[in-house]
Image: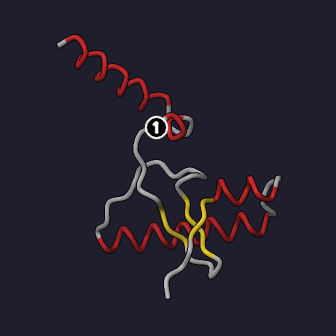
Amino acid sequence: MSSTFVTLAEVLEARGGPLEEDEVWSLLLGSAESLLDLSYKGHNICNIITPASLLLSATGTLAFKNCAMTDEVCAFTAPEMLQGRAISTKLAMEK
């Protein structure tokens, strides 16, 4: 039986408010365990985990959505990473 996933962003939007503290800790623990599991298996995941890329199921399963560098992801990206991207884009345009 496969699980249906929703993003954390969708959950927060539907609730209309923040998570409770125990829910946040549960998400952090589940995320850390999932990241360790993926690391041990040698899977490469998106470097940026956002509310839109964290997938949740009703059974408590966590997963991470593969993400591209979109405007939404850029909001959660370190400024120095964006500066490097802007420089490489500018160099590509100059060539």
Residue 50 horizontal/vertical position (percent): 56, 50
Residue 39 horizontal/vertical position (percent): 36, 68
Residue 61 horizontal/vertical position (percent): 56, 77
Residue farthest toward the top in the current orientation of the protein: 94
Q: Residue at x 41, y 56 (%)?
A: 66
Residue 69 horizontal/vertical position (percent): 41, 39
Q: Quadrant of residue 6?
A: bottom right
Q: Is residue 7 above or below residue 38?
A: above
How many marks are shown on the rendered structure?
A: 1
Q: Residue at x 51, y 52 (%)?
A: 49
Question: Looking at the picture, which amino acid does disc 1 mark?
Answer: Thr
* Side of 3 where 20 appears, left or right: right
**Residue denoted by label 1:** 70
Instruction: Bin the neighbour count of mark 1 within 10 Å (Cα to Cα): few under 14, some 14-19, many 20 and up.
Output: few
Q: Residue at x 57, y 69 (%)?
A: 5
Q: Residue at x 61, y 52 (%)?
A: 51
Coloration mode? secondary structure
Residue farthest toward the bottom in the current orientation of the protein: 1
Q: Is residue 86 above or below residue 27?
A: above
In the foreground, 90 or 37:
90
Q: Quadrant of residue 41?
A: bottom left
* Side of 22 where 77 appears, left or right: left
